Image (spheres, coloured by chain):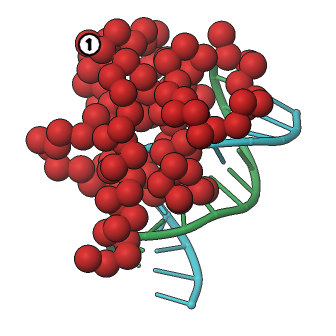
Chain colours: A red, B cyan, C green
Amino acid sequence: MSLKNQQIERVVQVISKIPSGSVATYGQVAEMANLNGRARWVGRILSQLPVGTRLPWHRVISSSGRITNPNIEEQRNRLRQEGVTVREDRVSLKRFRWNPAHLPDGLPRSSEG
DNA sequence: CGAATGACGCACT
DNA sequence: CAGTGCGCCATTC
């Protein structure tokens, strides 16, 4: 197992822990996987996922609450299936963002709503 | 090594 | 909310 492989596994592990009906941002996942600032890499990892993967990749969205996945229809369908409200390509982070309680309380997300 | 690319993120206009 | 610019970093050519 190479180092990169372990990091990828970290990311996969984090994503697998996102509860149904909630979403997490790429940056959030990166931070949880000790890859602070590597949000891009998280996206790249997701793009490398096998087609039949069991990983809930659809619960990962951009920091602005938008679906940046090329398979927007697929992701939107999956999210709605879990009860997440999706408007076009946008999800309300205020309502659906996953907060595992390891994050500080004073996060600047008052602009949501 | 240099240039271009990408399922990102933040600041500015 | 839309558009643009810059920073970030692994991968690809």
The percent position of residue A102, horizontal first and vertical second, equals 59, 40
**Pointer 1 indicates a residue of which chain?**
A
Residue under the image location 42 percent in, 23 percent down: A22
Q: Amino acid at mark 1?
A: Gln
Q: Is B1 above or below relative to A94?
A: below
Q: Is A63 above or below relative to A31?
A: above
Number of on-image labels: 1
The percent position of residue B6, horizontal first and vertical second, equals 42, 50
Q: Is B3 above or below relative to A21?
A: below
Q: Is residue B12 left or right of residue A48?
A: right
Q: Is residue A100 left or right of residue A42?
A: right
Front-most of residues A25 and A69: A25
Mark 1 residue element: helix
Front-most of residues A71 and A96: A96
Q: Is A83 above or below relative to A98?
A: above
The percent position of residue A58, horizontal first and vertical second, equals 33, 31
**Residue occupied by mark 1:** A81
Front-most of residues A4 and B9: A4
Residue under the image location 38 percent in, 57 percent down: A10
Q: Is residue A108 left or right of residue A41?
A: right
* Among the 4 quarters of the image, the one containing residue B5: bottom left
Residue under the image location 39 percent in, 64 percent down: A7
Is disc 1 surrounded by few (<14), some (14 to 19) or many (20+) residues within 10 Å? few
Tell me if I can see residue A100 in this picture.
yes
* Among the 4 quarters of the image, the one containing residue A113: top right
Residue under the image location 30 percent in, 14 percent down: A82
